[in-house]
Image (tube, coloured by chain):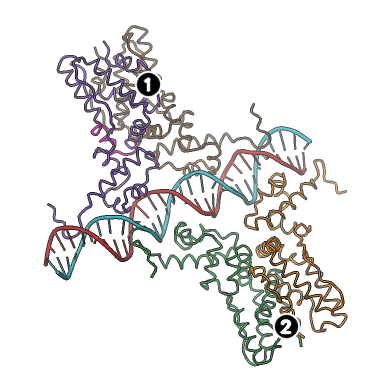
Chain colours: A brown, B purple, C orange, D green, E cyan, F red
Amino acid sequence: MTDRGPGALRSESARVAILRATADQLVAHGWNRLTIEGIAAAAHVGKPTIYRWWSSKSDLIADALMEGMLQLESPLPDDGGDLREDLATWLEQMLALAGDPVATATIRYLMAAAAEDEAVGRRFDEANGAMAALATRLEHAKSAGQLDAEVDVADLVDAITGVIILRVLRRAPAAPGDAQRLLGSILPR
Amino acid sequence: MTDRGPGALRSESARVAILRATADQLVAHGWNRLTIEGIAAAAHVGKPTIYRWWSSKSDLIADALMEGMLQLESPLPDDGGDLREDLATWLEQMLALAGDPVATATIRYLMAAAAEDEAVGRRFDEANGAMAALATRLEHAKSAGQLDAEVDVADLVDAITGVIILRVLRRAPAAPGDAQRLLGSILPR
Amino acid sequence: MTDRGPGALRSESARVAILRATADQLVAHGWNRLTIEGIAAAAHVGKPTIYRWWSSKSDLIADALMEGMLQLESPLPDDGGDLREDLATWLEQMLALAGDPVATATIRYLMAAAAEDEAVGRRFDEANGAMAALATRLEHAKSAGQLDAEVDVADLVDAITGVIILRVLRRAPAAPGDAQRLLGSILPR
Amino acid sequence: MTDRGPGALRSESARVAILRATADQLVAHGWNRLTIEGIAAAAHVGKPTIYRWWSSKSDLIADALMEGMLQLESPLPDDGGDLREDLATWLEQMLALAGDPVATATIRYLMAAAAEDEAVGRRFDEANGAMAALATRLEHAKSAGQLDAEVDVADLVDAITGVIILRVLRRAPAAPGDAQRLLGSILPR
DNA sequence: GATTAATCGAGACGGTACGTCCAGTCTTGGA
DNA sequence: TCCAAGACTGGACGTACCGTCTCGATTAATC
């Protein structure tokens, strides 16, 4: 497609190993202790190979994010008829997740990356499976009349996601009943 | 009070200059380019003076935050009778603020600090004047019966704050009508 | 001639371009800033083409030396009858040469190459036209009885060459009368 | 003496360890494989400490040279009455030294350093004990009338040193009788 | 008022990681 | 089979900061 002339092609295995290592190191050590040298070593790759294809740590993380390397293993909401019940169950799981050190670390380091880097920020929710699934569930509910027509699904997803993020940043563990109460506050009636 | 014995006392001017420089550098360069060396130079202070009193970058930022050095000049909601109208006006201002580079930088760098550091995270909203004012306004509305008794004010504040944060991270400029629509989605009816 | 099987033959133009570029880069930048990559670029040749035929920088330089690419444009001694007069004239030219930046650079970089690499060292004077000419002139003088029979021509050539080299290394410019005095010290009477 | 203002003083132990390591590494690996990183490691010193005080590899070597860290353990000429005899004995030892791998390596790497770097070149013979001792011996001989008044001692020292250097570069082992023949060629009668 | 100790600014220290250059090898496609 | 181009792993470069330690000067409680 693009005429590159002769010369060896970019190594796909190196590309994947680098993104894999980036995601691993991010989750393990956080944005600030994430070193290019560490990634290069973990991926068995020379530093120049990283710098040849990515311009910065942020760029790397944004790419790893988009390749799904940083996917959180987050629960997805059921679509079992009753919206409030489905959401309550899901929220409970999500808030419980907020007690899991690995999951919260992932979220926090992603937040840090998003805060520091525009590219990560823009792609932040594109790559978030839970947000997408939640949007789908709410859209379904809305077309089924379970949700007020006035409600903007994207806004509601942001509100719910935002609460979860704030709790993660605050390092606040979930108490029993939190999910129910939260839902009652955001989705009244 | 405590018997310190002889010797010079801690220099208050140095303390303030360091916190001031920390806040300035954070807003100007972000968490990652914030260097102790830079702070020391800007505050005309030796590095050991910083390390004598603070253990880390995070510690410094958390302190600067608590001293109000990083206070956002955020608008406060009116308390003029109609909740929805007051909130709509305030939200509009807040979302407009999300278009201001300095304000968004401050928020983003605070997020980064909170994400990386537990101390900052825990104090994140203690130091946020807008959140406190919003909580007060909502509490007032709740006791005036303008808000469903089921609603937890703290949760609602989190939801609204969370949406704003997500928009800042996403670098999404506010469009006209966003505030109204958003309010309609989170505070339906 | 020799049956090499199928495939393209070694490119003579590439070979020459590489040696030419090696000599140019050596004189221009010195042994230490001489890069294979630079030579490859200057010779419009791929790096592997260089490594295919030469094992090291030293090997390249030794080869360039033997191909006469690094020949100094040094004056040759006259053979006009009087040995002392001929040598004085020649030495004066040589010492003047030692004031020429290009010539001294060439000599110094050759010295560096000889010091670092055995192959260059062994071929050092084989490729030096001035030393050979001087030897011839002295041999002639010796057979004409102008030089003591005791004198070993090769040793005398070394002594004179050595003095010139030391002056080049010392970056000592020649003063008037140096050639005469030098000759008086090494070839007394 | 010099007002440096406040702050810690330069560490003498670090300075010496660095020069020591430089000399050791130079003799062991040669100019080209001499790495600042290697020196830092061997001297148990951070790289910036080296760069703080020396601008380049050459600078380091020139300094090590002047501190006598690279002193060759070269024999010194006797002053026993007969010049030719003393010189013959000394030259024999020197040429034998030219067969010693460590001594020749030292000389060759010093040559390389002198060739590449002006500072090393200028100080080349200041730091050479053998050259100084030879000059003293010859000066003595000259004032005793054993040496022609026409002879310039410095030139003669250069000639003898130059021959030795050329032999070292040429990797030519000394044959029996070389010293005698050489002396007969340079110091005839 | 002298002593004493903790402070201060400055800055050198041993280190880690940066982002770059180049080494030497391997791969690709064309001649 | 060789060539040019160029990507690869890897090592060293010279720089920026880290967090610690050491200096000489200053300052204030204790003697």
The answer for which chain carries disc 1 is B
- Closest to the observer, A164 or C164: C164
Residue type indicated by callout 2:
Leu
- Residue C149 locus on image (x, y percent): 83, 84
Task: Work out whether B61 lies above or below C22.
Answer: above
Query: Spatial distance from mark 2 to mark 1, Cα to Cα?
Result: 94 Å
User: Please, what secondary structure does the residue beneath circle 1 have?
Assistant: loop
Tell me which corner region of the image, top left, top right, bottom left or bottom right, holds residue B70: top left
Amino acid beneath label 1: Ala
Disc 2, SS: helix
- What residue did someone put label 1 on? B174
Is mark 2 in CB contact (under 8 Å) with mark 1? Answer: no
As displayed, is residue A108 above or below residue D185?
Answer: above
Q: Relative to the observer, which residue lies in front, B34 or F1? A: B34
Query: Would residue A19 be counted in the magenta stretch?
Result: no
Q: Is residue B96 above or below residue C56?
A: above
- Pointer 2 residue: D183
Q: Which residues are drawn in magenta?
A: B115-128
Q: Are marks 2 and 1 on the same chain?
A: no
